[in-house]
Amino acid sequence: MFNTIKTVCPLLLVCIFSLVVSGCVETSMMYQGNLPSTAMNLVSLQRDGSHSGTWETFDIRIDYKYIFQSADVLDISGQAALSEHYQMNYGNLSRLDVFMFFLDENSRVLETAKLTRAMTGDVTEIMTFSRQFTVPAGATSLSFGYDGRTGSIRHGSSFYELPLKKN
């Protein structure tokens, strides 16, 4: 009996460790090679001067401003906020992660960057961001995306806009 336990325990630990490690994916590699949905408006990267705009879906509005500090270093700042639909119909926000995607000439994701995350749980929270990124070689445009949930696990609503298409 003792020999069986000595054999099974290490095997079980290796299996658990393998499951945990295989579930960990670096943020920059998330969605790599995927295409944005039609709702994910593309922003052409312009390397001269300062540029600003608004990226908006039914769920969220992102106001941004960017400038290239050098040939491959991008400074981006702005703010993200949930749409009035969520602000009027939901009491709290369980989670919200906002991403930026660097895209190639074929609109395929080269790299994913997390821009900001909701921290207060308040649906009216305005999430500000100011980040600097090294732009991957071949990036010609960018887009934004998000993954969030309002309410509680039992009585909430999930919402997202992510580049999930492989083809």
Image (spheres, grey):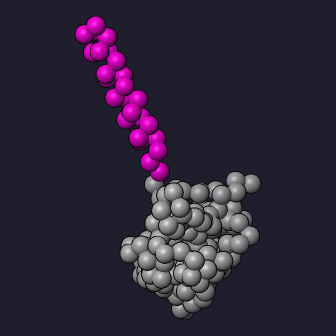
- In this view, the residue farthest toward the front is 155
Locate the N terminus and report the quarter of the image it occupies: top left
Return the x and y of residue 20 as percentages of the image width and height.
41, 41
Residue at horizontal 57%, vertical 64%? 157
Q: Quadrant of residue 4?
A: top left
Return the x and y of residue 89 as percentages of the image width and height.
57, 77
Query: Residue 25, relative to residue 46: is it above or below?
Result: above
Return the x and y of residue 11 as percentages of the image width and height.
36, 22
Q: Is residue 2 left or right of residue 94?
A: left
Q: Is residue 47 visible in this depiction of the protein? A: no
For this rendering, which residue is in front, 20 or 29? 20
Residue at horizontal 47%, vertical 51%? 25
Examine the residues drawn in magenta and state their main secondary structure: helix
* Residues drawn in magenta: 1-25
Q: Is residue 91 visible in this depiction of the protein? A: yes
Query: Residue 71, relative to residue 161: is it above or below?
Result: below
For this rendering, which residue is in front, 6 or 159? 159
Return the x and y of residue 36 as percentages of the image width and height.
68, 65
Q: Is residue 19 magenta?
A: yes
